[in-house]
Image: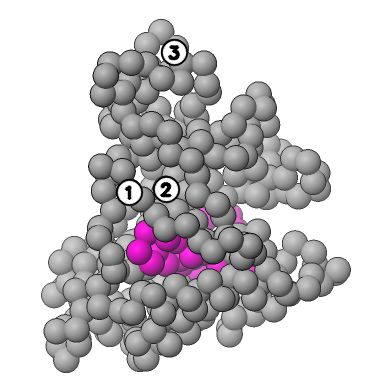
Amino acid sequence: MVSTFALPPKGLPGLSRLPEFIACGILGCEEGAVYIKNDDGGRLFLSEPVWGGYLAHWLGRRVRVHRLPQRDYENGALILLLAPDEPAPPPPYIILYYNERLPGYLSSLFGHIAINVDSRVFNFSEKPYENEEMSVDEYLYRPALGEFSSHPESLTFNLDDAQRPYYYKFGRRFMRTIHALYIEGLDTTRLTELLRTEIEVIHQTPVDPRFPHKYRDFRFFRRNCTTIIRDALRQAGLTEVSGFLPRELFINTAYQVSRPRRQENFKVCASRMEQLKVPEQAYCRPCPILNPMNRLRLRHLSRIPGAHSILEC
């Protein structure tokens, strides 16, 4: 089964267009030749490069294949995006993605958070090009090729060459361990509208010429990836959620929706997606908990199926 996603409105800044779904089958490799074996036994994409990270983790598994509009810098070919062929849950739902921190990056000390609303992922960042609406496959499984990769020398983002930017934003499953909080019971139509408006506002904000690669109005305490999602959740019905750091919001939201007086309104489940290790990325690290109240709230989360992902993160 292949997940389908609703197309975003045309002309809205910052929304990635959907990658083109082109095939589904078993990822195989024989004598150095990589291919996708379809249901008819045919071998597809024998002449097209496939990122080695996919082979390391999914060889022999069923995958779905998308063709991205971006090109591989090494050979000029359009990039293939592969993802495990797993069905998406039926809407309406949201999934909070708390990403552990990247090693060696001070700005990543507290990790990162994004939100999946009915199979569309909204990501916010101080870097304008990372403020995106995208498919789940793009967020989790982009290959470390072309503009998605890190610069070969600095091993991070580099925008010095406008023709060959290195945005360092390949699939987050390959960059970090991700903790997922699944929630049913929110107004996802309203939440989608709020988050799309935030994307539009960010991309329409004039650039500060002193810091051209940063979102001008980003603020650590009151306008960051966490507070934008937090405020949208509040307006969509979760009025009590709090926190301005990724892990704090993740724990607080889990606690709020699992409290006895709220349980009848929400269906909640937590899971943990371990980092898929690739040579392009070192292992991630856990983030500290700064709010002592959230340490206490962790004690109440054992009632959530799969809550070990929250208790251990």
- In whole angstroms, how far apart are the C-alphas of marks 2 and 3? 24 Å
Q: Residue at x 35, y 91 (%)?
A: 240
Q: Are marks 2 and 3 in contact (CB under 8 Å)?
A: no
- The percent position of residue 136, horizontal first and vertical second, equals 41, 53
Structural crowding at the residue carrying mark 2, measured as other residues with C-alpha within 10 Å and reported as few (<14), some (14–19) or many (≥20): many
Q: Residue at x 49, y 78 (%)?
A: 194
- The percent position of residue 96, horizontal first and vertical second, equals 37, 68
Q: Earlier in the sequence, mark 1 or mark 3?
A: 1
Disc assigned to residue 3: 1
Residue 99 occupies quadrant = bottom left
Mark yes or no: residue 210 visible: yes
188 is higher (above) or lower (below) than 281: below
Q: Label 3: which residue?
A: 33
Q: Are marks 1 and 2 in contact (CB under 8 Å)?
A: yes
- In whole angstroms, how far apart are the C-alphas of marks 1 and 2? 10 Å
Going by the numbered disc 2, the residue's amino acid type is: Asp
Q: Is residue 144 magenta?
A: no
User: What scheme was used to colour the molecule?
Assistant: one colour
Structural crowding at the residue carrying mark 3, measured as other residues with C-alpha within 10 Å and reported as few (<14), some (14–19) or many (≥20): few
- For the residue pair 66 and 75, the one nearer the viewer reads as 66
Q: Earlier in the sequence, mark 1 or mark 2?
A: 1
- The percent position of residue 171, horizontal first and vertical second, equals 48, 47
Total marks in image: 3
Q: Earlier in the sequence, mark 2 or mark 3?
A: 3
- The percent position of residue 184, horizontal first and vertical second, equals 25, 73
- Local secondary structure at mark 1: loop
Going by the numbered disc 3, the residue's amino acid type is: Ala
Going by the numbered disc 1, the residue's amino acid type is: Ser
- Local secondary structure at mark 3: strand
Disc assigned to residue 137: 2
Per the rendered image, the range of residues in magenta is 99-126
